[in-house]
Amino acid sequence: MWPVLKLLLLQAICSAQRGVLTEGKQTQQAGHVSVVIVGGTGDLAKKYLWQGFFQLYTSQAGSGHTFSFYGGGLSPDDQGTPVLFDILKHVACSPDTPVERCALLKDQFLHLVQYRQLKTPEDYRALGRHIQETLQGEGMVEAGRLFYLSVPAFAYADIADQVNSSCRPAGGAWLRVVLEKPFGHDLSSAQTLATQLGGSLKDEEMYRIDHYLGKQVVSNILPFRKVNQKFLDPIWNRQHIERVEIVLKETLDVKGRIPFYDQYGVIRDVMQNHLTEIMTLLTMKVPQILSSSEEVLRNKLQIFSHLQPVGTKQAVIGQYQAYTAEVREELNKTTDQFSVTPTFAAVMVHIDSAQYDGVPIVLSSGKMLDERVAYARVLFKNDVFCVQNPDHIHCKPKQIIFHFGHGSLEHPAVLVTKNLFKPELVDGEWREVTEHKDTTVLGFPFSDYYVQAPKVQREPYAELIGHILSGRKDCFISAENLLASWGLWTPLLHSLRGSYPRIYPGGEANGNLLDLRLSATELSYASDSVVIISPETMGGTASESFQVTQGKFRGDDMVSAWGEELIVRLATDLQAAAEAAVSEGGAFHLALSGGSSPLALFERLAQHHLSFPWRETHVWMVDERCMSLREPESNFHSVHEHLLQHIRIPYYNIHPMPVMLRQRLCVEEDGGALLYEKEIAHAVNGSAFHFVLLGVGLDGHTASLFPGEKAHERHGDSLVALTESPVKPHQRMSLTLKAINKAQRVGLLVIGKLKHELLTQLSRVKNKPNKWPITGVHPANGKLVWYLDYDALLG
Ligand SMILES: *[C@@H]1O[C@H](CO)[C@@H](O)[C@H](O)[C@H]1NC(C)=O
Ligand SMILES: *[C@@H]1O[C@H](CO)[C@@H](O)[C@H](O)[C@H]1NC(C)=O
Ligand SMILES: *[C@@H]1O[C@H](CO)[C@@H](O)[C@H](O)[C@H]1NC(C)=O
């Protein structure tokens, strides 16, 4: 029994399969293999594919296989050939190859490669004929044909069709067509693509690459779980696992890739594929026979059927601050264009099963973060409470880390804290790292861990290319797997469509801005912070120029978002206040400002808030210019134009300011201010408005209370006063600070880049109502909320 088991184990190891031609049931015949890289002079081919195929070629020496390689491109042969051979000059042998042998191998390889224009159906027919003739001319037995489609996804269907009609091998030889992501952008587009491809290729002929599955640590997850099953079985469950984190952090931005990236965002770019694959490898049932592609794929698929749906309550999104400017530049957009594509996201997934019920699995990834690192960590509960000696290993977190790359380690590794168990090595390709490095991993010294690392590091593409040749389908994405993954992510992507990402400055300066809080069912940002840039430090480093406030501005609550979202929030808050007031006292008293800032709000209210209790709402004015209310410049006129004429509000609920009495404008002795004050006192309980909407001018004025007015002294106990503006028309009527500060709720709406500097100043100045009337707004028994858009806040 034991030797058989051991044999199975040995067979099991993904990386051990390199160069092995017989595997599982798919016994393969040695013979000639034709490799065609469509897009053979493109970036991916240049960086990874030719190198991978060269390695394949050298590792296959003596296997009985012979090869020919074709680099396909759209250019004619005379142009494409030199480009291709320029790329091929750079292929490298493994470091242990003697120089002369390497030169010989490269020379042989170059002789096997040729460039071919692949543009029209005729080009594919000619290629098919050429392969056939080569085989016949040399009297070779054909093993198979491998087409690597390194082209944009929209070209897949057409190329697959050409391959099917002109390049299918005859007899028993195989056809394998390799595809790169993106495989669609949601469930239905992925289904469409699958259907299109299905007309030309059989499922077993398609190899969808996720290069993460070629990373050594990733392909080691299942073998590691298998050889350490005796340690893991008792603890790999909800009783012991605190949470699972799958993290891919990048420091780069997406400059240069915006036309692609802005359509996709971080969830489609890396979460739907790489991080989801890792999640399934960590949580799927360990197969009885690791080398059985079928069993691996089946078990993987099973996990998807147990995933609970993910909604906006389990996700947060962010966007680095410079992103919008990059979008405007690369997509040639106007300056009022902004993008809501997330460049950071964190999502919590739950698996509905007895084994994992309630275990949070957090997937997170972002651009412009503080470090480049990718890992998955399984954190276990630790029930030891250390009374003394908290540095002792027993007091520390128990965790297993699959470290895929970068970060503080220069090599990929699997780390197990010494308070868990000493893991077995998977096979001859892995070694134990015993030298204690002067480094920390996720905050703990290297010496806290048992560490395993691959003896030789290999490129994922080279690994996967080897697996294609040996038919290792479990290292690729099956159609069912792909659709199941989109099935998980598509509903979330749809419900996030209207959401606005949190803006983060990038790099170290992100501070704690992107930290997460997990509850049993929800994931959110740990702080309500937003970011304020201060002009003095603009020239300094990013970390100096950002100051973070905790959802507060000048000590009062703050709501901040992009312009449109902000208006939606304010309108929603207004309606909530209206409904509460009406249900409590039968009426809602709202005082509105003029100016341009609230126009978008008025329009939003008129168009979208059909259930707003207008019939019970009284509309008052915060201030008015001394002019006929028919003049377009009057505040009332603007409120009427943009709001009142569109809603069903009783006309006796509308309270314009009496700026014209006895056919004269704002004459003190006509007593207009006093009249309005009496009207307020009569209609509004305690003269306390339910909601006062204010703006702020560049000089710090609010309502029509201007700097230098000495409002406190002059207005005394009045609720309404005549005031003087420094700009025309000079005469105004305005609610006083006294009236404003009686309100139950004051909303201060500030939008637009122009206000940025003002906000920065306001964020520091003390209360000096004579100099900055806005700083005199402090509702005595109510609440002040600042509604600030990102343009005003961030500049
Ligand atoms: C390939 O093309 C042939 C016709 O040349 C067609 O009958 C077949 O259905 C196509 N698809 C597959 C998967 O073979
Ligand atoms: C960008 O816009 C400018 C002005 O509208 C135009 O001249 C230019 O051709 C555009 N460039 C691109 C790449 O669309
Ligand atoms: C008027 O206000 C007072 C104090 O705020 C409150 O106790 C009372 O219930 C209010 N009356 C009405 C009719 O809302």
Image (spheres, rainbow, N blue to C red):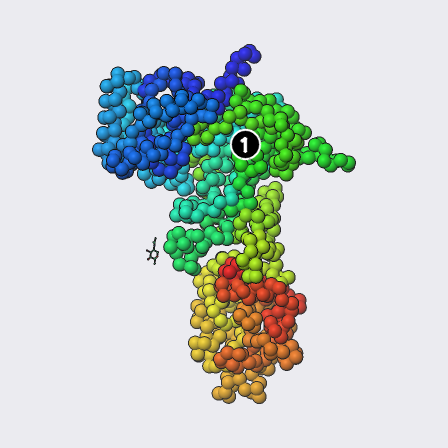
User: Is residue 464 in view from this perspective?
Assistant: no
Judged from the image, the secondary structure of the residue bearing numbered disc 1 is loop
Total marks placed: 1
Residue at x-position 53% and y-position 74%: 621
Q: Quadrant of residue 56?
A: top left
As drawn, 234 above or below 716: above
Residue at x-position 53% and y-position 20%: 428
In front of the other: 412 or 705: 412
In front of the other: 6 or 233: 6
Q: Which amino acid type is marked by label 1?
A: His
As drawn, 561 above or below 37: below
Direction from residue 34 to residue 378 in the image, left or right: right
Residue at x-position 65% and y-position 69%: 767
Direction from residue 401 to residue 102 in the image, left or right: left
As drawn, 775 above or below 214: below
Direction from residue 53 to residue 247 in the image, left or right: right
Direction from residue 199 to residue 773 in the image, left or right: right
Q: Position of residue 219 (x, y in %)?
A: 50, 28
In front of the other: 205 or 96: 96
Few, some or many C-alpha atoms within 10 Å of disc 1 (few <14, some 14-19, many ≥20)?
Answer: some
Quadrant, the N terminus:
top right
- Judging by the rendered image, the residue that carries numbered circle 1 is 411
Q: Position of residue 548 (x, y in %)?
A: 60, 55
Q: Position of residue 214 (x, y in %)?
A: 46, 30
